[in-house]
Amino acid sequence: MAVYTDITDGDLETFLAGFDLGAPLALKGIAEGIENSNFLLETEAGRYILTIYERRVREEDLPYFITLMQWLAEHGFPSPTPQADRTGKLLHRLRDKPAALVSFLNGVSVHEPTVEHCRAAGEGLARLHLAAQGFPGHRANGLGHDAWRPLYAGHEADAEALKPGLAARIAADLDELERDWPSGLPQGVIHADMFPDNVFFLHGRFAAVIDFYFACNDALAYDLAVCLNSWCFDPAGELKRAHAHALLAGYEAVRPLTAIERESLPLLSRGAALRFFLTRLIDWGSTPAGALVKPKNPLEYEAKLAFLRRPDAMLGLFETNL
Amino acid sequence: MAVYTDITDGDLETFLAGFDLGAPLALKGIAEGIENSNFLLETEAGRYILTIYERRVREEDLPYFITLMQWLAEHGFPSPTPQADRTGKLLHRLRDKPAALVSFLNGVSVHEPTVEHCRAAGEGLARLHLAAQGFPGHRANGLGHDAWRPLYAGHEADAEALKPGLAARIAADLDELERDWPSGLPQGVIHADMFPDNVFFLHGRFAAVIDFYFACNDALAYDLAVCLNSWCFDPAGELKRAHAHALLAGYEAVRPLTAIERESLPLLSRGAALRFFLTRLIDWGSTPAGALVKPKNPLEYEAKLAFLRRPDAMLGLFETNL
């Protein structure tokens, strides 16, 4: 939940004077996104999400995110479409902060995805990967596999405090993932955060993907691993095999995986689980008590990581008859 | 800003099964209201605000608020209209908490009201008072003039810490207000919190009033005093006389004040300023550091109170040529 910057009617008037969107009809701060301030803005021309970028987003990354959203919209992928101002610019300023105005998308995210939701999410992710092909922007994955060791440095005691023995176990994970990380994986634009809350469904069908603020260039199959981890585990940290099978089948119905992608998926999933464990571990320790933004418990991803260390974690997942 | 209760798609499905509003199209937590969790909910039937009442609202007061909103809507006053479920009930439950579903209203609140906004707000308040006539519900004003002394008890040191000498000054205010508080003021339903952020304008015209969760039965002119204090002061704590004149003229164009109401207005305004000073003083001391809900600075109302102690504070405000 986040509205860090207030917008007055005067700010709004000044801002909208740069567009051809008519008069404002409604403005509501919305609880979406942790990093930015978001508003539902309705004008005579339609409904939009107005985002003000706060300090956790690096301003130099914004053109990548905004032009990617524009590219995806132009290539038929259902995602927020940035609105240009009268001068054609997609990145604006409001209260001396960078801001964007994107189309409002209908849809509701699912809290407990069914097998069919997982199939649709897999298809959606593959569609995203194909739609982004040819996008000229490039942004390195700042939370990719080469960032995990420096991320973990200094947080060994936090891990140990969470669970005795965990500090050494994470250190061993880092060693094994570095040693075994595959090369030769097809690269492209990845969403990098396609959790269920970033996917909208309408009448039970896939409708849109939002929140592209972790998007970057990396291995496509790593994005699928992020998705698998966030859509296909039960609360006890066990893989829901029918869900996972459907997610992979949905993905492959649109973009078949290469042999190396299939073989690497268990390791990529371990890596993706480690990535979310590490950022949650760090946020867990650094959020003041009483803050309204509750950090996510790192133990959820610790359990997934433990499951994914098992050599048989994904055995048989690609078989057609599960 | 407030979303204290999360709603999943499953919760929403269960909730909407009790209504004839079709499938959900969008659900967004919104940053409106401090006491409750609010969501923008769009269904195939239209757009609504879904409110979940958190512990700061007394459950026994909810029927008064909800039936008042229904009454106002039925009597042509632009305010949120509660939606009945299939059984005809206006008060619902969601995640085991009381909840209401009201119509979504277009409009944007103004941050720096102009003279014309003040005139429109005055007219709107008088329309509200007239529309509520005959409403059969009754709720005592829990923050009315007889509540101020007990509210202040135990907070003398907080007042003194804010400004040396203030503790005794507030004690003297309490004495004077108790001694001079008028009787014989026309009574009725008052909004009791009609600050600019609770009034919507569209294309510069008065459009609607929201947030009836302080509504109660009290002196109508006291409501006008609350409005005057929140719409017609500059940041330095001086009354903006043209704004105040317009607010009063707007009110009287719809509902002329009685002689005793006019005479009492300076004292009622002093009382209303004390009421908001006191609740802000208490919230100021009790909000943990780092909380995202920022308490409002009590000094804003301390300055208004100081102004309103002046015997000439409102001199000539009712003259037709200002």
Image: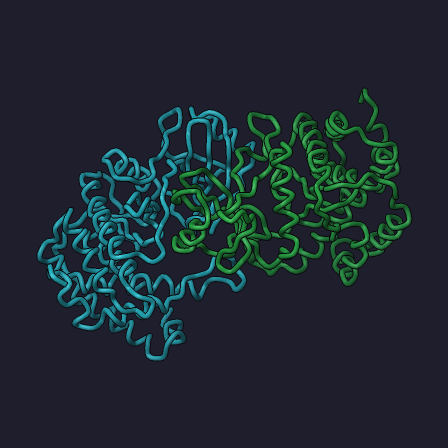
Chain colours: A green, B cyan
**Residue depicted at 85% across the width and 52% down the height:** A174
Residue A139 sits above or below residue B245 on the image: above
Q: Position of residue B32 (x, y in %)?
A: 43, 48
Q: Given the current orientation, which residue lies at the most extreme top position? A: A321
Pick the front one: B106 or B168: B106
Q: Is residue A237 left or right of residue B250?
A: right
Residue A110 sits above or below residue A88 on the image: above
Can the viewer see residue A168?
Answer: yes
Pick the front one: A15 or B110: A15
Pick the front one: B108 or B188: B108
Q: Position of residue B77 (x, y in %)?
A: 25, 39
Q: Quadrant of residue A118?
A: top right
Q: Is residue B25 left or right of residue A296?
A: left
**Residue depicted at 81% across the width and 43% down the height:** A270
Q: Is residue A46 left or right of residue A146?
A: left
* Quarter placement of the C terminus of chain A: top right
Pick the front one: A34 or A308: A34
Tally of numbered tags: 0
**Residue depicted at 35% across the width and 53% down the height:** B110
Can the viewer see residue B3?
Answer: no
Q: Position of residue A30 (x, y in %)?
A: 50, 46
Q: Given the current orientation, which residue lies at the most extreme bottom position? A: B164
**Residue depicted at 78% across the width and 57% down the height:** A152
Residue A257 sits above or below residue B186 on the image: above
Q: Quadrant of residue B261?
A: bottom left
Q: Quadrant of residue A250?
A: top right
Q: Given the current orientation, which residue lies at the most extreme right position? A: A179
Q: Given the current orientation, which residue lies at the most extreme front position? A: A87
Residue A18 sits above or below residue B288 on the image: above
Q: Position of residue A29 (x, y in %)?
A: 47, 48
